[in-house]
Amino acid sequence: MQKELDAAKTGVEIRILGVNHIGEESTNDLMTDGRTIPWLQDTAADSVWDLWNIIYRDVVILDEGNIPVAVYNLTLHDLGKPNNYDCLKSILTDLANP
């Protein structure tokens, strides 16, 4: 999806990255193996999962000030289904075109 978003003409650049939960550091290698997605490890000092009230497989969409404006859960909305994929892509592009 990132390549499609890069090609889209949006008012704001869209970047997808992952944030791993505190205590799951041992899975970082598995999550990044063979992938190009930027991957961050949450820390006790930042605690974004708690700050943003994230649950497993949430896509948290941030505004330009890194404030959450929408959440899309991938467990409930499998991106393997074209309608869900298109919905998330539309949410991202709509929010990037104020």
Image (cartoon, helix red, strand yellow):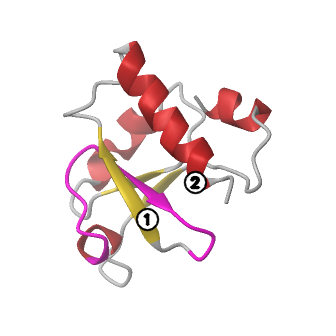
User: Which secondary structure, mark 1?
Assistant: strand
Q: Quadrant of residue 23?
A: bottom left
Which mark, residue 95? 2
The residue range painted magenta reads 51-65
Mark 1 and mark 2 lie on one chain; the one further toward the N terminus is 1
Q: Residue at x 56, y 67 (%)?
A: 63
Q: Residue at x 56, y 39 (%)?
A: 37
Q: Quadrant of residue 31?
A: top left
Asked if residue 57 lies in the magenta stretch, the reply is yes
Coordinates of residue 20 in the picture (x, y in percent): 34, 54
Q: Residue at x 24, y 53 (%)?
A: 24
Nearest to the observer: residue 3 or residue 77 = 77
* Three-letter residue code for mark 2: Leu
Nearest to the observer: residue 28 or residue 54 = 54
Q: Are marks 1 and 2 in contact (CB under 8 Å)?
A: yes
* Three-letter residue code for mark 1: Val
Coordinates of residue 3 in the picture (x, y in percent): 69, 28
- Compared with residue 46, is residue 32 higher up or lower down, i.e. above or below? above
The local crowd at label 2, few if under 14, some if 14 to 19, many if 20 or more residues have their Cα within 10 Å, is some
Q: Is residue 60 left or right of residue 94?
A: left
Pointer 1 residue: 69
Nearest to the observer: residue 39 or residue 12 = 12
Which mark, residue 82? none
Q: Residue at x 33, y 45 (%)?
A: 72
